[in-house]
Structure formats: structure tokens, C-alpha cells
Image (cartoon, rainbow, N blue to C red):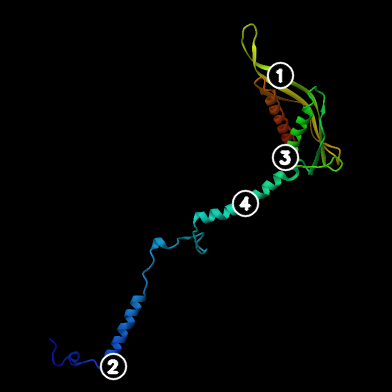
Amino acid sequence: MSSPTDPLARWKPSGGDRARCKRAAERTSIRAGSRREPTSISQEPRPTLRSRSSAWTPRWPSSRRFGSVAGSLVPLGLAGCLYSFAGGGLPNIKTVAILPFDNDTPQPTLTNDVTSAVTDAVENRLGLRAAAQSSADAVVRGRVVRYDPDVPLAFQPGVGSAVVTQRQVQLTVDVEILDQRSGRTLWQRQGLSLVGEYTPPQETDGRKIALQKLENEIVDGAQSQW
């Protein structure tokens, strides 16, 4: 218990002192209420330090980095597609005239069949534009040299004689792609032999296979000039 002479016991706060104390308490309460708790360490972006002297940079999600790389590759991919069709596989050749092939065989329909196969290879697969012979950059010409429709391949023993179960057609052609401006031969095959197997009597199936092989030979030969 304090003695009567204790100055703290005799002191009583005045009205002004009580008001000042109340305002100080309110300011302290406001500051305490407005203080935010620190963000969890796991929620903050972790810096990636490239060196001791360089400033940190936030680590972006891998999907964003992948998107930017993929976007930069799209123009390159489109440029590659445009290049592969430019010129149709033959240097400086944009237009072509396909001349009807001469036919040395007794099969008159082969003229149209071979010409159609050549047209599909040069215009549709190589992308060259058809033009008149007088204005075309190049011409394709050739000759059907030989056609054998029933070369036997497989036999099955039978009574008195064997039965042919598999046959093939054999088509032989000469073909040339000529640069009309320079007079230079761009690609040429003499005596090109193409075969197509079929089950008798479906000779047309074997012929289609042989003609498809002719298309492939022309396309591969033109693309070898890149």
C-alpha cells in the first residue's frame, strides 16, 4: 500500500490528460488493425539469379515459355511449306506442256493412260502449271516402247497342265523433261521398265499399278534436281 507521501498516489489525471490518452490509444489501435500479415513464402515468386551482380527475374510458367517458342516456329514452318512447292521441284520451271506420247504398241488406249499418268505427276504432284507448248518453260515428251499384259508369275499344279494364279503387266517407256529456254534436258529415262502384278483376269489392276510407278519415277526424278 502506498504511503501518503507517495507523489503517484496523490496524482489524479485531469480531463485534458484523459482525452490525450484516449486519442493515443485509438491511433495505436488503427495502426495495429491496418497492418497486413506477411505473405507466405510459398506464395511469393522465387527469383532466378543469373549472377551475383544481376537483378533477379521472376520464373515464368513453362507453358508460357513453350507458347512463345512454338509461336516463333510457325513462320518457319510456313516458309518451309512454301519453299517445297515453289518451282515444282525443277529449278526455274513454273509452267509445262505435256505432249502426247508416241505409242509403238498394239494397245491404242495406252497413249491416253500414259499421258494421264504423266499429267498427274507433273501438274498435281509437282505443282507445275499447264501451258501451251509455245509458251511453256518446259515440255514433257516420250514414247511407249513396249507393253506385255500377261507375264506369268505364279502357278498352281492342275490336271494335265499348271494354272497361272498370278500375272503381271510390263510397261516400258522413254520419257524426257526438256527446258525449252536453254534446250537442256532436265531429266530423262530411256527404256524405263514398270511392272504391276494382278490376279487373272484383272489386267487393268496391274496396269494401274505400273502407271502409278511411272508417276513416282517422274516425281522422284524431278525432285532430284533440287
CA gap, disc 4 to disc 2? Answer: 77 Å
CA gap, disc 1 to disc 3? Answer: 31 Å
Helix or strand or loop: what does disc 4 sit on? Answer: helix
Q: Are marks 4 and 3 in contact (CB under 8 Å)?
A: no
The label nearer to you, 4 versus 3, is 3
Q: Is residue 126 above or below residue 170?
A: below
* Residue in the image at 71% along x and 18% along y: 150
Please say whether residue 93 is visible from this viewpoint: no
The label nearer to you, 4 versus 2, is 4
Q: Which residue is mark 3?
A: 124
Q: Earlier in the sequence, mark 1 or mark 3?
A: 3
* Residue in the image at 77% along x and 27% along y: 110
* Residue in the image at 62% along x and 7% along y: 159
Q: Which residue is mark 4?
A: 74
CA gap, disc 3 to disc 2? Answer: 102 Å
**Residue type at the position of mark 1:** Asp
Q: Which residue is mark 2?
A: 16
Q: Which residue is mark 1?
A: 150
